[in-house]
Amino acid sequence: MRKFIYFLVLFIIPMLSDAQRWKHERLSLYGAVGTNFFLGDLGGGTKDASHYFSLRDIDWAYTRPAVSVGFRYRLLRDLAVKPTLTYARLKADDAESESYGRQARNLWFRTNLWELGTQFEYYFIKEKNLGRYTFSSYKGINKLSAYISLGGGGFYFNPKSELVRGDGNWVALRDMENEGESYGSFAAYLSIGLGMKYKIDNRWSVGFEISNRYTSTDYIDDTHDSYSGIDNGFADKHLETIIEDDGSVTVTDIRAPAYPAGTPLRGDPAYNDAYLFTMITAYYKINSVFSMPKY
């Protein structure tokens, strides 16, 4: 009987310790590097965006870097909040699209984007503490956790383009009002994402996260709706196209006459712009004093 009680105590104490330890390990520093994909009116892949995660409209040639820093705080055992500051370079070019209509439109842009926001992470595969002597320490599967994230925040953007593709002279577009309307340089976003983490030890974890940002603006790429009739070299760059008898289309390098004001199809006003992050993440846990024994 004594052996049974002794075994029971050794079995229960680690469970109680693990159940309370997260309260003393709430705070972690966070850093991430990765890539972003712009999902707006310009550029794109072989198909139109699906407006969910929009993976089918990604232009892989214009993958650009992103970096993020912040911290993570566990509100509950399986719920955390993560404020972050993120920098990304967004870029798109109609010339890289496989859509003849986009190629003929012949617009391109880039912008630096600074984002400040917060996301909430719910762990549907729970984080586990690594004991010193328990069998779980030697099972790699116990080092994995996974979460779904929801969040939001704001960002700054300033779209630019070149008068001639490749000349290297990038000019800010916002003040030109290329569609006859003004827009601001700040906007809001909502995000949804999935992530996973692998615990290296009781301090360090690494992981991977993919998240989509749905924004409150359709002007990240300076393109929203109809042509304005403005002839400044930036508002209308569309090219002449040749339609053969067999129905094939050839987009030439010849600049076509400017469209009159109100001509549609410069952009699609039905949907706002979005962008997608894929990030490799790292966490460093900052523990408070924890007096319970480790097993």
Image (cartoon, grey):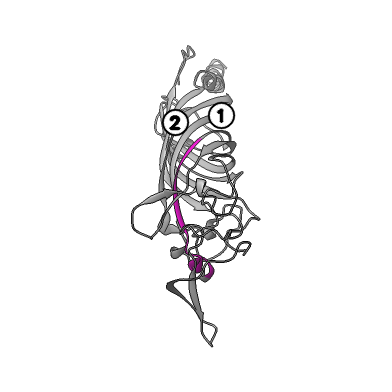
Badge 1 element: strand
Type of the residue with mark 1: Val
Q: Residue furthest bottom?
A: 245
Where is residue 191 shown, x and y percent of the image?
58, 41
Foreground: 142 or 184?
Answer: 184
Which residue shows up at 50% across the image and 69% down it? 104
> Residue visible at 60% across and 49% down?
181
Task: Sort mark 1 into few (<14), some (14-19) or many (20+) by Cα contacts within 10 Å.
Answer: many
Q: Residue furthest right?
A: 270
Q: Nearer the viewer, residue 97 or 281?
A: 97
**Range shown magenta:** 101-115
- Numbered tag placed on residue 81 in the rendering: 1
Indicate yes or no whether the magenta region holds residue 54.
no
Residue 91 in sight from this viewpoint: no
**Pointer 1 or 2: first along the chain:** 2
Disc 2: CA contacts within 10 A as few (<14), some (14-19) or many (>=20): many
Residue 20, position as x, y percentages in the image: 56, 19
**Residue drawn where x is 57% and y is 61% of the image:** 229
Is the C terminus in the top left, top right, bottom left or bottom right quadrant? top left
Residue 15 image position (x, y, % from top left): 55, 23
Instruction: Please say if 101 is above or below 220.
Output: below
Towards the viewer: 98 or 112: 112
- The amino acid on which the numbered mark 2 sits, given as a three-letter code, is Tyr
The reply to whether discs 1 and 2 touch (Cβ–Cβ < 8 Å) is no
Query: How far apart in space, not on screen, are marks 1 and 2 (Cα)?
Result: 12 Å
In this figure, which residue is indicated by the disc labeled 2? 30
Quadrant in which the N terminus appears: top right
Comparing 140 with 197, the one in front is 197
